[in-house]
């Protein structure tokens, strides 16, 4: 499979998108075609062993039958549900009171989005009601159908392609139709998938792998950022139901600054600190750290798109920073007269004496600079 080349990507994204990094005994399973129930490889016994001790343990037969009927890999389905719900499951997955005398289930978290847990819960319940998922069996069958229609039969039939939409036939723009936000999801789920085959003695079976090859890719294999750290601006949303503390340091032992509620957004400027902590900046300019375990990347928060030229008082050009603060790292400097695309303005004002604009350079890289040094 040959697709357009990788260009202008963050180091971490480039690493996880470069297939050459994952042609290993475990990593290769992110390229397995999961749009099939492979008889003799997948089995009810294998499903039972995987769901044992989880909230799905009473539904092994339902999963097996639904996956056979839909011709979908059941181990892929189990991995997806457990990633969404965890082994113990949440109220959304295990049963929501519909207020109509029925209990509704949404184990795939389909439609479970919004600002704050109450809205997320309400949307998940509304989705389950609209599909009539008033039993776990109906919800599992419906979720499998949803995955089959929208992903597996839409040219995204591997874990890799679930995460990285690299086929224009899937609809929309490239890289936009992603099942999950987690950058490492395909890599981590591949390990889970392989373990299922190994644990059932089927690791030596015949598998179909769909491995993309990129045109014009660099001869040098993309490397993972040093210390797994990545510096670039991305918008993230708090997912912890009870909220998440902004702290002075990258540790739960650090002093608390303030609590952000579930669904609130904040700008992450560096990730991978002390394992999985983010350095973030709030809209008022407060800089701190938050645990990445409870942050989910969301779409870039943009509110405009126009071209502007750099224009400074002394003609020396301007620094571009990773976030809207002179206390944050400079990522580059651009000369007077250079054109950039402004994609957000008015969100970060009066920080270090400046109102800040979020810009995109010709390379595709994003950053921030004072709005006063941009002329339309």
Image: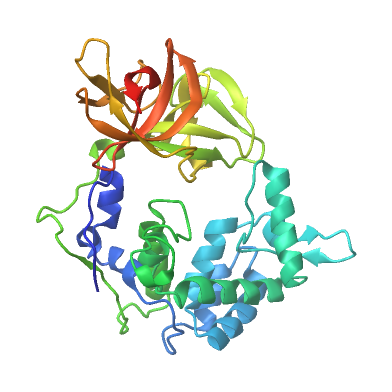
Q: Is residue 48 left or right of residue 8?
A: right
Q: Is residue 352 visible?
A: yes
Query: Which quadrant does the C terminus fall into?
Result: top left
Q: Is residue 13 left or right of residue 351?
A: left
Of residues 361 and 183, the one nearer the viewer is 361
Of residues 125 and 190, the one nearer the viewer is 125
Quadrant in the picture for residue 208:
bottom left
Q: Residue at x 26, y 21 (%)?
A: 319
Query: Residue 298, image x and y in percent?
Result: 49, 45
Quadrant in the picture for residue 187:
bottom left
Q: Is residue 274 visible?
A: no
Of residues 178 and 273, the one nearer the viewer is 178
Q: Residue at x 54, y 86 (%)?
A: 68
Q: Residue at x 74, y 58 (%)?
A: 125
Query: Residue 349, image x and y in percent?
Result: 49, 19
Q: Residue at x 51, y 32 (%)?
A: 266
Considering every residue shown, the one lying at the far front of the view is 376
Up the image or down, 209 lies above or below 28; here it is below
Query: Residue 9, image x and y in percent?
Result: 27, 47
Considering every residue shown, the one lying at the far left of the view is 219
């Amino acid at each position: 499979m040959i697709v357009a080349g990788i260009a202008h990507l963050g180091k971490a994204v480039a690493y996880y998108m470069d297939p050459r990094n994952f042609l290993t005994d475990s990593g290769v399973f992110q390229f397995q075609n999961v749009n099939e129930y492979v008889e003799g490889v997948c089995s009810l016994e294998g499903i039972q062993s995987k769901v044992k001790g989880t909230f799905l343990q009473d539904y092994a037969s339902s999963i097996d039958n639904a996956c056979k009927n839909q011709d979908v890999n059941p181990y892929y389905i189990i991995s997806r549900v457990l990633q969404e719900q965890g082994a113990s499951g949440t109220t959304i997955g295990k049963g929501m009171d519909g207020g109509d005398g029925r209990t509704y289930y949404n184990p795939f978290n389909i439609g479970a989005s919004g600002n704050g847990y109450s809205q997320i819960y309400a949307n998940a319940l509304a989705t389950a009601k609209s599909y009539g998922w008033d039993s776990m069996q109906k919800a599992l069958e419906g979720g499998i159908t949803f995955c089959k229609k929208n992903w597996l039969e839409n040219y995204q039939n591997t874990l890799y392609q679930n995460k990285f939409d690299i086929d224009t036939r899937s609809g929309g723009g490239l890289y936009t139709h992603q099942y999950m936000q987690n950058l490492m999801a395909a890599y981590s789920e591949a390990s889970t998938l392989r373990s299922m085959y190994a644990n059932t003695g089927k690791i030596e079976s015949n598998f179909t792998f769909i491995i993309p090859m990129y045109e014009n890719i660099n001869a040098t294999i993309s490397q993972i950022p040093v210390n797994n750290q990545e510096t670039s601006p991305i918008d993230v949303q708090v997912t912890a139901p009870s909220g998440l503390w902004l702290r002075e340091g990258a540790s739960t032992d650090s002093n608390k600054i303030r609590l952000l509620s579930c669904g609130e957004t904040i700008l992450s400027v560096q990730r991978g600190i002390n394992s999985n902590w983010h350095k973030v900046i709030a809209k008022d300019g407060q800089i701190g750290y938050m645990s990445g375990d409870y942050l989910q990347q969301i779409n870039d928060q943009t509110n405009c798109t126009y071209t502007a030229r750099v224009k400074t008082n002394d003609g020396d050009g301007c620094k571009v920073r990773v976030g809207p603060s002179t206390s944050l790292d400079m990522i580059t400097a651009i000369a007077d007269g250079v054109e950039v695309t402004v994609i957000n303005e008015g969100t970060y004002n009066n920080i270090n004496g400046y109102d800040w604009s979020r810009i995109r350079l010709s390379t595709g890289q994003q950053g921030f600079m004072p709005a006063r040094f941009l002329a339309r």
